[in-house]
Amino acid sequence: MLNILVSIKQVPDTTNIRINPDTGTLIREGVPSIINPYDIVALSLAYQLKLRFKAKVTVITMGPPQAKNALKEAVEFGADRIILLCDRKFAGADTLATSYTLAEAIRFLQREELFDLFLFGKQAIDGDTAQVGPGVANRLGIPVITYVVKIENLDPIHRKIVVHRKTEKGIEVLEAPFPILLTCEKDLSPLPFVPLENILKAQRAEPETFNAEGPLSFQRDKLGLKGSPTQVKKVYTPELKRIGKIYNLDDVSLDDVVSKILDVLRERDLL
């Protein structure tokens, strides 16, 4: 049976983002939260694969207690097991500390059963780093394919997958063995129709909660702010640039336009 792990993140609605000017961290209190949109794509893909291959889907997230709402929503997408990493010692983590915490939790889960496919959103909309998925893959010692836009073939019997990934120069087609971690682009999987049975199941679902004390052991100096070498020194709103002078050159020749541009550049000592 295909065994899938999906990592999701609950993020602030980006239309309501506020920054604490003293700490440089997001102010989450009183801000509506949603599942990161790229993680929704990962959940959608996992659901489609579950229907096709009778896969088992485990969903994990790290966050405050309210993040359990994101995991309950994941049950609507067919999640069979939901894990919440929740502890004040995890708070303030940058991508290095986050990837460490997630990887250690996943390594613990794999004592029971190994995962074939790991699905992450390509990036979180509150940070836009695109680093956590590859960071987890590196810590687990498994290959990663980023910016996946299409699954061409998935063969659970021969344990391999063929995917299309977006690059700056076009589309690459890659084949990889399991286990493999994919980061998902927005066009990878459409939102599925969620049956009423899943919605009712989600209302009753409660996640398993892991904290810094157990059920696994973490290196405390690698958690949260203590394990985060990335430090925000200053947060500010940049000043708006002044609008440049507008010249009306509609009724002049091209030579006159070029001449005017050269005059302006000379006035500013740019020539």
Image: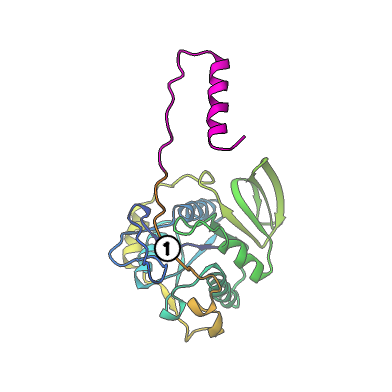
Above or below: residue 222 compared with residue 197: below
Tag 1 residue: 235
Can you see residue 218?
no
Residue 60 point in image, percent of width and height? 48, 68
- Residue 97 found in image quarter: bottom right
Residue at the farthest left position: 30
Q: Is residue 159 left or right of residue 242?
A: right
Above or below: residue 241 compared with residue 133: above
Q: Quadrant of the N terminus?
A: bottom right
Residue 177 point in image, percent of width and height? 71, 58
Secondary structure, mark 1, is: loop
The region drawn magenta spans: 242-271
Count residues near mark 1 (Cα–Cα under 10 Å), then give few for <14, some for 14-19, many for 20+: few
Residue 174 point in image, percent of width and height? 71, 48
Is residue 248 covered in magenta? yes
Frontmost residue, 163 versus 18:
18
